[in-house]
Image: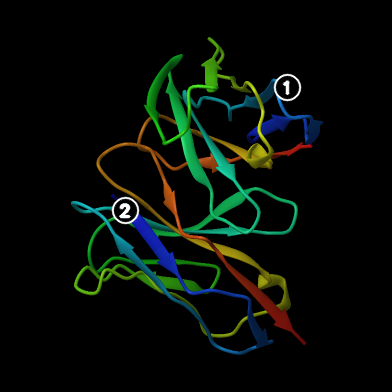
Amino acid sequence: GNSVTQMEGPVTLSEEAFLTINCTYTATGYPSLFWYVQYPGEGLQLLLKATKADDKGSNKGFEATYRKETTSFHLEKGSVQVSDSAVYFCALRAGGGNKLTFGTGTQLKVEL
Amino acid sequence: ETGVTQSPTHLIKTRGQQVTLRCSSQSGHNTVSWYQQALGQGPQFIFQYYREEENGRGNFPPRFSGLQFPNYSSELNVNALELDDSALYLCASSLTRGDEQFFGPGTRLTVL
């Protein structure tokens, strides 16, 4: 079946540091890939997405590139802010349906 | 434009009871999906409703059931509650099947 594996957290960074959160996936066919962010006490918000190989999704300084050869979709940001502190979820959608398969999430803490 | 809303925000039940959670989809959206997010885990797909009919189901027992109304709002019903049902229940709506999902803030269910 489909699955998503994320690096375990928490990840603690100083403000303005470079961020990478690793995500790899297993899926049949050609899934769409997503990063969602969950701030404390809130629901999930779509951060970025990519629908085919070599696509790069980007939003709010975050980027992720769909790498089919390595089945990866790593999230990066060049300079994190305290306001980026949240839990980040990698997810995929495959098979033409609407079901999202999520990873376990990675908590990011950014300190001054 | 009003986003996805869910009620109640928090709920405490005892084992064996039944619970109903409610979700109002974003205006114009005809598809609603429900997810269960256990503490420290990623959301797990329960089922999806499209135009008032179930349109896909995850690996959840039949005591998890749902409904979608003509205005596309939705209910999630859980019978014979178990301790492991304690989780955040997320509702997501989309314009139609396969489109971006917009999540509500969730209902926190605690089963004692």
Element at label 1: loop
In this rendering, the answer to whether B34 lies above or below A23 is: above
Whether residue A112 sits left or right of residue A9 in the image: it is right
- Chain containing mark 1: B
- Total of numbered circles in the picture? 2
Element at label 2: strand
Query: Which dot, 1 or 2, sits closer to the camera?
Result: 1
Badge 1 is on which residue? B17
What is the C-alpha distance between the residues marked 1 and 2?
38 Å
Give the amino acid at mark 1.
Gln
Badge 2 is on which residue? A32
Viewer-side residue, B33 vs B40: B40
- Residue A54 spot, x, y in % from top left: 24, 69
Mark 1 nearby-residue class (10 Å; few <14, some 14–19, many ≥20): few
- Chain containing mark 2: A
- Residue B53 spot, x, y in % from top left: 42, 15
